[in-house]
Image (cartoon, rainbow, N blue to C red):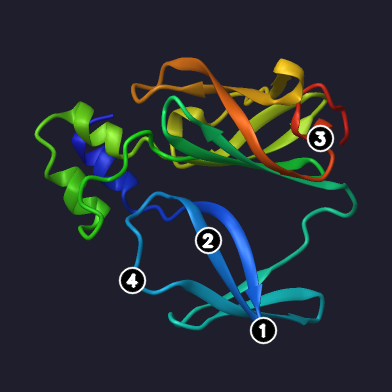
């Protein structure tokens, strides 16, 4: 991608992490975030209205409506860690849908400066691409195929995640890419798992 295309990617918003509840307030703990951290927490309230989950921001004025796409399906999720690369990951599956997040291997050099400014200030294209090497993808599982449908990294759309357990279930290997977009396997350590771990592998055939 050329520099204007890389700058265009800075207009995306994407993160992955865990949700914490405290006396009716729900806060997202962003383990992975495409952009630098904001000074205020990502917190809001949740309530049901006519079968729709409504989220309203506390520190930022926004309203989001969450609608059910698919009935049934046991959920499963895992917090991931790649110790040698120093980055975190998240894999979530609900029914035939999955979400995969991977942090950039190297933290943003200036956390208080916007991503657009940091990418625009890079002298070489490879440096700018490295700052954007943060993936949040959504896809669907069908007949054992984990196909990515949307992603912060355009070259990932249409590819297969292919998660597979290794080392007696202690590791999860996925098909990933390097900062230049070249395919490579990535081995994750399973830090925490919720739900049946078999649902997080390509060998499971649940629809």
Q: Residue 23 carries which label?
A: 1
Q: Image quadrant for the C terminus? A: top right
Which residue is label 2 attached to?
Answer: 29
Residue sitting nearer the eye, 125 or 32: 32
Left or right: residue 136 versus residue 162 is: left
Q: What separation in Å lies between label 3 and label 2 (alpha carbons)?
A: 24 Å
Identify the image quadrant of residue 190.
Answer: top right
Q: What separation in Å lies between label 2 and label 4 (alpha carbons)?
A: 13 Å
**Mark positioned earlier in the residue sequence (1 or 4):** 1
Left or right: residue 40 versus residue 116 is: right
Question: 10 Å neighbourhood of mark 1: few (<14), some, or many (≥20)?
Answer: few
Which residue is label 4 attached to?
Answer: 39
Q: What separation in Å lies between label 1 and label 4 (alpha carbons)?
A: 22 Å
Residue sitting nearer the eye, 26 or 71: 26
Residue at x 40%, y 22% (from the top left corner): 178
Could you tell me which secondary element the residue under label 1 belongs to?
Answer: loop
Judged by depth in the image, the label closer to the viewer, 3 or 1, is 1
Could you tell me which secondary element the residue under label 2 belongs to?
Answer: strand
**Mark positioned earlier in the residue sequence (3 or 1):** 1
- Residue 101 visible? The answer is no
How far from the left and from the top, in percent, is residue 43?
A: 52, 75
Could you tell me which secondary element the residue under label 4 belongs to?
Answer: loop
**Does the residue at mark 4 contact the one at mark 3 (Cβ under 8 Å)?**
no
Which residue is label 3 attached to?
Answer: 199
**Mark positioned earlier in the residue sequence (4 or 3):** 4
Judged by depth in the image, the label closer to the viewer, 3 or 2, is 2
Residue at x 18%, y 29% (from the top left corner): 125
Left or right: residue 102 versus residue 19 is: left
**Does the residue at mark 2 contact the one at mark 4 (Cβ under 8 Å)?**
no
Q: What separation in Å lies between label 1 and label 2 (alpha carbons)?
A: 16 Å
**Mark positioned earlier in the residue sequence (2 or 4):** 2
């Amino acid at each position: 991608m050329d520099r204007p295309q890389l700058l265009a990617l800075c207009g995306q918003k994407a993160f992955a992490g865990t949700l914490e509840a405290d006396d009716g307030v729900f806060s997202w703990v962003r383990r992975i975030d495409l952009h630098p951290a904001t000074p205020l927490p990502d917190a809001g309230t949740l309530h049901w209205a006519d079968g729709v989950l409504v989220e309203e921001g506390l520190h930022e004025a926004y309203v989001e409506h969450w609608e059910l796409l698919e009935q049934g399906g046991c959920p499963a999720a895992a917090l991931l860690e790649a110790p040698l690369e120093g980055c975190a990951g998240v894999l979530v599956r609900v029914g035939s849908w999955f979400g995969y997040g991977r942090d950039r291997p190297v933290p943003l050099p200036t956390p208080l400066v916007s991503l657009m400014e940091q990418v625009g200030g890079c002298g070489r294209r490879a440096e700018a691409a490295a700052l954007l090497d943060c993936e949040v993808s959504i896809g669907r599982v069908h007949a054992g195929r984990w196909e990515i449908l949307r992603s912060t990294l355009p070259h990932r759309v249409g590819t297969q995640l292919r998660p597979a357990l290794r080392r007696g279930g202690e590791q999860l290997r996925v098909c990933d890419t390097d900062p230049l977009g070249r395919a490579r396997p990535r081995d994750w350590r399973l830090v925490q798992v919720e739900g049946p771990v078999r649902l997080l592998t390509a060998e499971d055939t649940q629809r």
